[in-house]
Structures are given as C-alpha cells and as structure tokens.
Image (cartoon, helix red, strand yellow):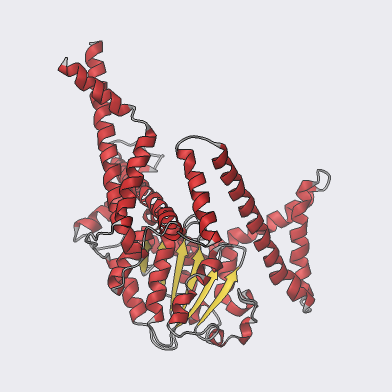
Amino acid sequence: MAAETKGGFVEKLQHVDRRILYLVLAVLVAIPLIWPFTLPLQVSPAVYSLYDHVESLKSGDVVLMSFDYSAGGAPDIHPQVEAIVRHLAKKDGVGLVTVGFFPDGPMFAEKVFWILEEAGKTYGEDFVNLGYRAGGEGAIAMLASDVKAAFQTDFRGNDTSSLPLLQKVKSARDFSLIIEFAGGSPGPPEWIRQVQAVYRVPLAVGISTSMVPANMPFLESGQLISILSGLRGAAEYEVLLGEAGKGSAAMSSQTLGHLVIMVFLIVGNVSYFLTRKNSSRRIS
Amino acid sequence: MSTNVGDWLAALSILALYSFLYKENPVYRFAEHLFVGISAGHAIAMAYGNVRDVAVKPMLDGRWVLAFPCLLGILLFARFSKKNSWLARYPVALITGIGTGMALRGIPSSQILAQLNGIFIPLTNISNIILFFGVIGALVYFLFTKEHKGIVGGFASVGKWIMMVSFGATFGTTVFERLSLFIGTLNTVLGDWLGIIK
C-alpha cells in the first residue's frame, strides 16, 4: 500500500503542470528584486583585467565601444555597458567613441550618455556616437581602416570631420582600448579577425552568457584581454567599481532561479528513474 | 505606478507575450504580430537611413563613383522577376567573394595559428593538462581515417567527454541568459511600470 502511494507520488512528479513550474520560478526570481538581499560574489580574473585596463587609461586616450546587440539581448548585456561607462565617466580626458553594427546598437549607446553628461562631459569633445552601419564584418573592417571615411556623419547628423574628439583618431590603431558588446553576429570572431589581428589593439568583449563557452579560446590564447559574461559580468564589474547597479541587484534573483532549476532537474530525473525502476519490476 | 506611455506599452506587451505560458490566446497573437510589424518597420527605416547616408547624400555631393555599387544593389531586386532573376547573380557573387576574402584575411592568423599557439602551454597545472589533452582528444575524435581503437580510441573518448562537458556548459549558460532576460522584463514590469522595485 505504502509502495503504491510512493509510486503514485513519484509518477505524479513526472506530470506536474508546467505552468506551476513557471509560477514557482517567477515568484522566486521576483522576491529578491522586491526585497533585495546580497549574496557573496567572486570577481573573475578576466573582469579584473578589463577593470585594470580602464583604470590605467590616461588623459588623451580614446576608447571605442561597439554596440552589437538588439533589444532581445539588452537585459543581459546593457548593465555591463552602464558599469563600464560609469567607470569611464570618472576618467578625466578619456574620450569615448561608440558605434553599432546592429541596427538597435546606437540607440543603446544614447541611453548611457546621461552618465557622461552628469560627469560634466560634452558631446563631440568627450564622446561621440557614430551610429549604425550595415555590412557586418566588411563594415567593421572599413571602420578600422578609416573611421571618418566609414562614418561621414554621426548618429546625430553632425559632420564627423567637424567633431573635436574624432580629430584624435584616424584608424583602429589610434584607440587605446576597444570593447565590443555582442549578442550575436558580428561578434568577437569578426572583431578579432578584422581589428585585433590586424591592428593589435587591446580588445575586450562583453557578451551574452550563452556566447561565453564558444569565445573562451580567444581569451585563453590572449587575443582578448577580457570577456564579461552577461549580467554576472556586469555585477562583477560593479563590485570592483564599488557601486551597486542593475547587475548586482539581479544576482540574488539569478542564484535563486538557478537553485530552483537545479531542484527541478534533480527531482525530474530521480522521479524518472524511480518510475522506470518500478515499471521494470512490474514487467519482471 | 508609471505615468509614462512607453512604460505602459512595454509592460503590457510583456504581459501579453508571457500570457502564452498559460495557453495560446488572441492577446498573445496580437502582441506577436505587433512585434513582427514594428521590427520590420524599424529594419526598413534603418535600411533607408543607410542608403540615404552612405549612398545618396555622398552622390549628391559629387561622389558619382558610388553609382556603381548602387546599381549592383538595385540588381539584387531582379530576383523578384522570373525573366531577369539571373541579373541578381552578379551582386550576390560579388558579395560572396568579398565576404569570403574578408574572412580569409583574418582566419589563418586569428582562428588557426593563434589558437594553436594557445595550446603550447606548460603542463604544470591541472587546468593546462585538461586544456592540452582536451584539444588533442577533440581533434582525434574527428579523425575518420583511423579506426577509434587503442590509443586513438582512448584520445577520441577523451575528446567526446570534453565536448559533452562543453555542450553542458553551453546549455547552462543559455539557462543563465534566459533568466537574465526574464529578470530584465521583471524590472520593466515591477520596476518601471508598477514602481514596486526601487
């Protein structure tokens, strides 16, 4: 009788309505956002590397950021951008040029400029948004060889040859650091092929989490100075910056979400094997 | 609660799309079609901006040499005509050739030699040992001219397990990313719209 009840319960676990699982996950992920609590977070060496590189920038240096993601990837990638731009805002005399090889890219760049404006920086002198250029890898190569030829006007319609910041840069070689934020293609391989391998400029990437395993070999081989991994990468950068932002706020939710999924996986597999064992016993 | 129209639109669209998790319904379908329509409209607007800024404006400023690539671009539309569709082959051939040439410029140095260089590492710690033998194993796994027996079979087996771990890592990071996206939408609904998250 007890064995039957146990078998029935185990079998029921195999057929739990997926909507209940969605609800449990949604509630547990939402709780830390509504009532925040902090869990310890270890910073990876790759994030230290990028932080140190930004920290070492001097007055007169110019950084290029490429926004190669769309609205679908933004929740995972955009918090990284905010953290790094907050860091750049603290650096006196360091310029920022942004570009996008995804149509939505330049709009995401515009969304972080308030951080630079709040720090007293001026458009055209301290930061410029070049805008979007179609063509993927070919357009990246064009930008790398001649910035102003690739973009004769910026995102706001200004003539690029009239912008003071762009007088400091002619090609990719003139940037002290390039950071690509990517949620697809063009992504790190294209930037490595057309920019890092040709111009030997320090290149870091902030990518959506699922892209990390495929791009780790570029970090291991030294072609990339850093990989920031999705929301976690943002949270780690915020830890180094000493300023809690969207990344840090989301980490407790991520942790709870992962725990729930792990429990689901374990319960699902255990119940599957128990059910299989029971049915094979019945057959024998 | 937000008084911004954009926040309302974003939050209601998210809720409409998530309603699919309960079951298929007209509200979900409306939001889905709305998304497809807006995305198509946005792509057309961006394409128009590109043609205007990269081709039309410079040509009006006297750079008539750009008429040649523009003509090739127009030929792409020939594929919509049964009679003249062959004309589209010329720009497609040019795009393919240039694309392949561009990629080949960097692939040998950045994706073959640099990667090979990356595995010439001192085998002094467990991480380097796994990396070295993992690469050898994965390469041996795709060696089809020798039967996977003995030492070759052993290396192929190591390669198979390393790839399995890699697939697992990819799946795990995909789950992580999907949760990040969900947290992003929760921030929009609970934070920007309802004001529950400060």
- Locate the C terminus of chain B and report the quarter of the image it occupies: bottom left
Count up the numbered dots: 0
Up-down relation of residue A175 to residue B169 (above or below):
below
Q: In this rendering, does residue B112 appear at all?
A: no
Up-down relation of residue A3 to residue A250 (above or below):
above
**On the picture, is A238 further left or further right than A96?**
left
Q: In this rendering, does residue A244 appear at all?
A: yes
* A44 and A139: which is toward the camera: A44
Q: Position of residue A258 (x, y in %)?
A: 29, 48
- Name which quarter of the figure residue A265 lies in: top left
- Name which quarter of the figure residue A91 lies in: bottom left
* B189 and B183: which is toward the camera: B189
Up-down relation of residue A143 to residue B172 (above or below):
below
Q: Residue furthest right?
A: B83
- Residue found at x 51% / y 50%: B12
- Locate the N terminus of chain B and report the quarter of the image it occupies: bottom left
* A152 and B4: which is toward the camera: B4
* A32 and A178: which is toward the camera: A32
Q: Residue furthest left?
A: A2
Q: Position of residue B120 (x, y in %)?
A: 30, 62
**On the picture, is B102 further left or further right than B61?**
left
Up-down relation of residue B172 to residue B53 (above or below):
above
Q: Position of residue A105 (x, y in %)?
A: 54, 65
Q: Position of residue A70 (x, y in %)?
A: 52, 59
- Name which quarter of the figure residue B125 lies in: bottom left
**On the picture, is A137 further left or further right than A13?**
right
